[in-house]
Image (cartoon, rainbow, N blue to C red):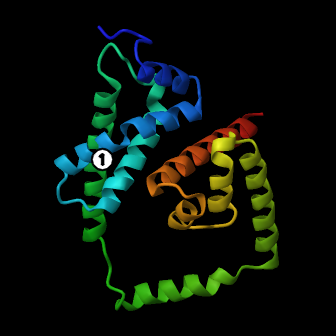
Amino acid sequence: MVKHGSTPTDELIRLAIIGDGTAFTRLWDTHIESLRAYIRSKMKHLDDFYVDDICSKSFEKAFRQIGTYDPDRSQFSTWLMTIARNTALDTVEHENRAHRQEVSLDDDKRTTMIVSSMEDAGGSALDNIIQGEEEDRTEKYIAGLPELYRDIARMRLVDGLQYKEIAEEMDMELNTVRTRIRRAKALIDKMKQDDNEE
């Protein structure tokens, strides 16, 4: 039987369960390299982009499901790797489906759809007002985030910077940026949900 609270990981898990995002970030820092190595060993045909994407998705799922983790049944690393394996299989299946459903750009109907969507991209004055109100709401939610996520969330959700640009600006690993943005989005979604329930 696993001893509760007997390791630094146990304490980080306990803090993550009660909503401490910093603790979960430390779990990421502790386990990311072993998780990457595990995915690479199981999915040798995947390139680094997909490996990193699977790692980010796996940690996001783990964060959402952290309350279901039972240390008496498995070690945290084993539980995380199970999530990663399932995420990797889902990703590969999704990619295979996407390739099967690809439509040629030479298809007239498809080309017409692309041109129509480009023509609609300008937006009306009302659309611009709505967008401005949405940006104000986003700023409000970003201000409510823990400090760890605020700047990154603003760069992505308000300024529209790409992950790579944020990583360079913050002098941070790309995977860390991805994870923190996912976590920030999850927290914002929770805040929006709480507002809607009031």
Residue 79 position in % (x across, y down) = 32, 29
Image point (37%, 42%), residue name: 32
Q: Amino acid at mark 1?
A: Arg
Number of residue marks: 1
Residue 86 vertical placement versus 164 (above, below): above
* Front one among 8 and 100: 8
Taking 74 as reference, is 144 left or right?
A: right
* Res. 119 image quadrant: bottom right
Image point (35%, 50%), residue name: 54
Image point (46%, 42%), residue name: 60
Quadrant the N terminus occupies: top left
Residue 163 position in % (x across, y down) = 52, 62
Image point (70%, 62%), residue name: 158
Q: Could one spot residue 63 in this view of the protein?
A: yes
Taking 108 as reference, is 22 left or right?
A: right
Q: Which residue is mark 1?
A: 36
Residue 45 vertical placement versus 20 (above, below): below
- Identify the residue at the far front of this view: 171
* Front one among 62 and 129: 62
Quadrant the C terminus occupies: top right
Taking 150 as reference, is 13 left or right?
A: left
* Front one among 127 and 137: 137
Taking 196 as reference, is 55 left or right?
A: left
Q: Could one spot residue 61 in this view of the protein?
A: no
Q: Secondary structure at mark 1?
A: helix
* Front one among 194 and 81: 81
Residue 182 vertical placement versus 136 (above, below): above
Residue 42 position in % (x across, y down) = 18, 47
* Res. 187 image quadrant: top right
Mark 1: few, some, or many residues within 10 Å (few <14, many ≥20)?
some
